[in-house]
Amino acid sequence: MHRAFFEAGADVVTTASYQASFSGFAASGISGDETARLLRRSVELARSAVPSGGRCRVAASVGPYGAALADGSEYRGRYGLSVAQLAEWHRPRLEVLASAGPDVLALETVPDMDEASALVAALDGIEVPAWLSYSIDGLRTRAGQPLAEAFAVVAAVPQIVAVGVNCCDPSDVGPAIAVAREVTRKPVIVYPNSGERWDATGRRWTGGSRFPPADAARWVAAGAAGVGGCCRVGPADIAAVARAVGR
């Protein structure tokens, strides 16, 4: 699958580690050592798909705490944990993924500015650059905080080399680019989902795809340094994005 996205024109792929966690795997009887091996393996698999001689990069996917719960709470945030508790939970996974040698850590689908603060704290001493992208609803995080305040959390953090939004409705992308640029002055990356909605109770996607590859050129014109897709966006969509931006 990683190779299919590279062949479609992607410059960056994310590893299959978004929902993987020590606590989640332990609940299924998987040991800590085996969990660490599997996390490292996710980076190795993505790296093995990188075309020779290209500029393609591997981003180690670090999903929010709610993603590991597998109940849709990454689209709500506000888990009842403190910033310190969230940082303690995230740190072991960050350490293992960083040790596998990704080009960047993708702190993605963050629904809550408190969790962004926790991720920044958990990054301390980890010498791999990271991007941080929020999942949003309009110009607010999924937890309801103003997006400008959320981006301010990471604006002065040198290790966060880019900011953006992901797994949101495509129609929310344009306004979010303007806020991210104004607040952080960092490169902006955007990769919305297809526009479908996840039904956590029914465990299925609902609605039709509204992912507009042609809009990628408008996102770039608005100041996005990187454009792509998240859930339900496949290689054919990415190939269309690549064409839209002249790749």
Image (spheres, helix red, strand yellow):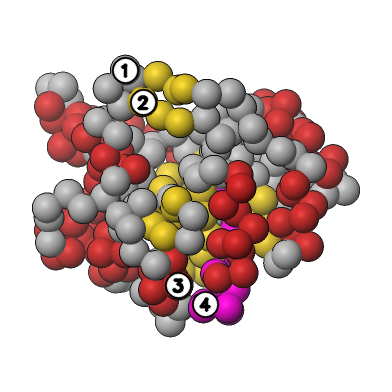
Q: Estimate the x, y position of residue 133 in percent, counting from the top left.
A: 47, 57
Amino acid beneath label 1: Gly
| Direction right: furthest residue | 246
Point out the stretch of residues depicted in magenta. Answer: 180-191
* Percent position of residue 233, x then y: 60, 31
Magenta stretch contains residue 219: no
Q: Is residue 190 above or below residue 17?
A: below
Going 23% across and 56% down the picture, which residue do you hit? 91
Question: Decide: marks 3, 4 in contact (CB < 8 A)?
Answer: no
Dot label at residue 184: 4
Screen quadrant of the N terminus: top right
Are the residues at dot 1 and dot 2 in contact (C-beta closer than 8 Å)?
yes
Q: Quadrant of residue 27?
A: top left
In depth, the one of 16 and 183 nearer the eye is 183
Q: Tell me the amino acid under the disc marked 3.
A: Ala
The Cα atoms of the two marked residues, 2 and 4, are separated by 33 Å
- For marks 1 and 4, the one nearer the N-term is 4
**Which label belongs to residue 148?**
3
Q: Residue at x 47, y 38 (%)?
A: 15
Asked if residue 135 is positioned above or below residue 46 in the image, the reply reads below
Q: Which residue in the structure is indicated by mark 1?
A: 202
Q: Earlier in the sequence, mark 3 or mark 1?
A: 3
Q: Which residue has dot 2 on it?
A: 199
Specify which label sits upstream in the sequence, 2 or 3: 3
